[in-house]
Amino acid sequence: MATPTHTGNLPAPMGTAGVSPVFSPLYQQIKALLTRSLQSGEWKPGELIPSEAELALRFGVSQGTVRKAIDELAAENLLLRRQGRGTFVSTHHEEQVKFRFLRMVPDGEPDQALRMQRQFLECHRMRAAADVARLLAIKPGDMVLEIRRILHIGGEPLVYEDIYLQGAPFRGLTAERLERYEGPLYALFESEFGTRMVRAEEKIRAVNAGPQEAALLKVPVGQALLSVERLAFSYGDQPAELRRGLYSTAHHHYRNALS
């Protein structure tokens, strides 16, 4: 994808007849161009991007403007600054990123969250139900991949979840491939299927365990569980994955930093 080389070609805000266009700050326009380069694959996960000076020359703006755009992308975990080495495209293989969307932590041992074991129960292709299709922005009946698994921490079942992926981008993903892969799923999606999850939205509510989930999570029927529905998006705000998880909170809690 060709990238503009001066500010005269920066993306123009969209306007409609009779409506005044809304102009974004220059650094936001540079941020949009940098995001476009990430989306197009010009700079791949883990790769070093050009220096601020090079990007300033490329876009015809000041280094301060570029720096502000990069700062925002770094805050959103799309870029990663490394002291003395430069700025890299963030990857789910990084320790500080790979558990980015996992908010459940043990009550007494936060580091225990890094010692997680996975148990895959099922991986198959199916026709998307209407609610799944709506969230993944596909048509009802389109093919999706469903993955069912349990996550264990310290030998204790913590999460039972259903994962739905659009069928076309994840063609070739099988139960055998999941079992062989030792890293986090998002790293697999990124490195082998070209889909990087950049942000997510969650809906959380309290529910009671039914017989099936009670048996899988080893809790009494009727036990209070945390129900978390997460919709993850790739570049361009494209919905790529739907997760519906039930979390046992007997010895863990949901933690989120607000600012």
Image (spheres, rainbow, N blue to C red):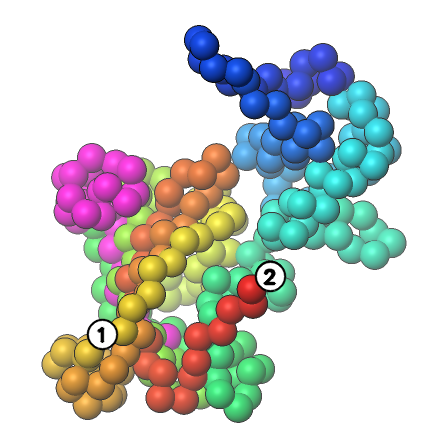
Q: Earlier in the sequence, mark 1 or mark 2?
A: 1
The residue located at (49%, 73%) in the rendering is 255
In the image, residue 132 sits, relative to residue 253, either above or below, namely above
Q: Which amino acid does the dot numbered 2 rest on?
A: Ser
Give x and y (percent) for residue 181: 44, 63
**Disc 1 to disc 2, C-alpha distance:** 28 Å
Residue 132 lies in the magenta-colored region: yes
Give x and y (percent) for residue 119: 33, 74
Location of the N terminus by quadrant is: top right
Label 2: how many residues lie within 10 Å, few (<14), some (14-19) or many (20+)?
few
Q: Which residues are magenta?
A: 126-151
In the image, residue 136 sits, relative to residue 57, either above or below, namely below
SS for callout 1: strand
Query: Of discs 1 and 2, which sits in the foreground?
Result: 2
- Whether residue 192 is visible here, answered yes or no, is no
Residue on which the image places disc 1: 207
Q: In the depicted view, which residue is nearer to us: 232 or 61?
A: 61
Residue 96 placement, left or right of 164: right
The residue located at (83%, 51%) in the rendering is 85
Dividing the picture into quarters, in which one does residue 30 lie?
A: top right
Dividing the picture into quarters, in which one does residue 33 lie?
A: top right
- Whether residue 212 is visible here, answered yes or no, is yes
Return the mark for residue 259: 2
Question: Is the C-beta separation of discs 1 and 2 under 8 Å?
Answer: no
Dividing the picture into quarters, in which one does residue 60 lie?
A: top right
The residue located at (59%, 17%) in the rendering is 12
In the image, residue 28 sits, relative to residue 249, either above or below, namely above
Label 1: how many residues lie within 10 Å, few (<14), some (14-19) or many (20+)?
some
Residue 128 lies in the magenta-colored region: yes
Q: Which amino acid does the dot numbered 1 rest on?
A: Val
SS for callout 2: loop
